Amino acid sequence: QARLLFPLMGLMRVALDLQTSSALFARIFEYLDLKPAISDAAGARPVPTDGALGRVEFDRVSFRYPDADGESRPTLDDVSFTIEPGQFAAFVGPSGAGKTTVSYLVPRLYEASSGEVRFAGDDVRELSQESLMTHIGIVSQETYLFHATIAENLRYARPDATDAELEAAARAANIHETIASFPEGYATVVGERGYRLSGGEKQRIAIARVLLKDPAVLVLDEATSALDTISERVVQEALDDAARGRTTIAIAHRLSTVVAADVIFVIVAGRVVEQGTHAELVGVDGVYASLYRQQEQRPVLETPSVE
Ligand code: ATP
């Protein structure tokens, strides 16, 4: 059961990465002969697109993975927070604290065991998954590229995008020059058995996709390593641009991300133990301040997981 969930989550994240049509979504599951763990409630409605679009709220949310031992502590324990439209929120904390799990509950990949997750002011259980997915974009550590041309990979995010729009998104994601340098340019076939792109190039393609999708809420699940300093800076600049003007939820490992955040939530063992800006939290001299001091010796903001 636990093993099955992981590839499934991977596909759910692919679906979020893209402008998912319900047909594509259905095909993914048909292919796997699986059904999404969570389905739409009767009468599920689209996300309301009035003033609260981009607001994300957790109201006393607790969560236990379906396959978790019933005796164990919940993965999220009475978590409450509000992220206002356009804010940049960073989640930090030790490995395994529950940061990524928070990001799974926003698009309702899993359902809260108790409490309420609200998107644009509405309980996510009342919203259709397809609509939620059109308003949430994700840039994660693993980027999935289809065995298809770069142009096609980008158009999955928005099938009607013109060539000029593809190029504008690729420029904003700092990847246009690289693509243009390939002999076949945007017609280069990538993905399995295709042209091998570096980790940083793949990430920038994922960013270009998100820019084309233009979601109200962006989830950034940052890589801890993999990129050298130069590509990291290039990717970071592209991410900063992508985050501008939309709600961004960053599962943060790098200091650069956190220092500029509108709000930082520090999660330890499934609970939000501190929240505030970088300056406020350094002033409090608690968990964040100590992570920050450790980070000055090491380049990531958490204790590495033992695997
Ligand atoms: P990291 O910084 O290492 O990515 P995190 O703070 O993002 O950690 P989560 O990935 O949210 O932590 O994991 C929180 C806890 O939930 C961990 O103990 C993890 O083992 C557990 N967990 C994660 N995914 C599942 C799953 N599909 N089934 C059961 N338990 C899970």
Image: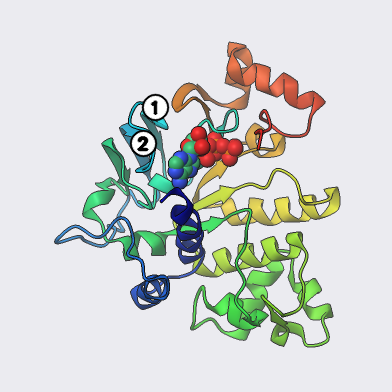
Q: Is residue 83 left or right of residue 148?
A: left
Residue 265 vs 182, above or below: the answer is above
Q: Is residue 239 left or right of residue 102?
A: right
Q: Are marks 2 and 1 in contact (CB under 8 Å)?
A: yes
Residue that mark 1 sits on = 72
Q: Secondary structure at mark 2?
A: loop
> Could you say which is closer to the camera, residue 72 or residue 119?
72
Q: As shown in the figure, which amino acid type bears the numbered disc 2?
A: Arg
Instruction: Provide residue 99's location: percent of width, then percent of height.
Output: 51, 37
Tell me the distance, in whole angstroms, between the alpha carbons under discs 2 and 1.
Answer: 9 Å
> In which quadrant of the rendered view does residue 280 lie?
top right
Q: Secondary structure at mark 1?
A: loop
> Could you say which is closer to the camera, residue 80 or residue 52?
80
Instruction: Provide residue 307's location: percent of width, then percent of height.
Output: 65, 38
Instruction: Provide residue 161's location: percent of width, then percent of height.
Output: 53, 81
Q: As shown in the figure, which amino acid type bears the numbered disc 1?
A: Ser
Label drawn at residue 64: 2
Tell me if I can see residue 90 in this picture. Answer: no
> In which quadrant of the rendered view does residue 112 lie?
top left
Q: 10 Å neighbourhood of mark 2: few (<14), some, or many (≥20)?
A: many
Q: Residue at x 21, y 61 (%)?
A: 45
**How many marks can you see?**
2
Residue 221 vs 148, above or below: the answer is above
Q: Is residue 129 left or right of residue 4?
A: left
Residue 219 vs 295, above or below: the answer is below
Of badges 2 and 1, nearer the viewer stands 1
Q: Residue at x 55, y 79 (%)?
A: 155
Tell me if I can see residue 258 in this picture. Answer: yes
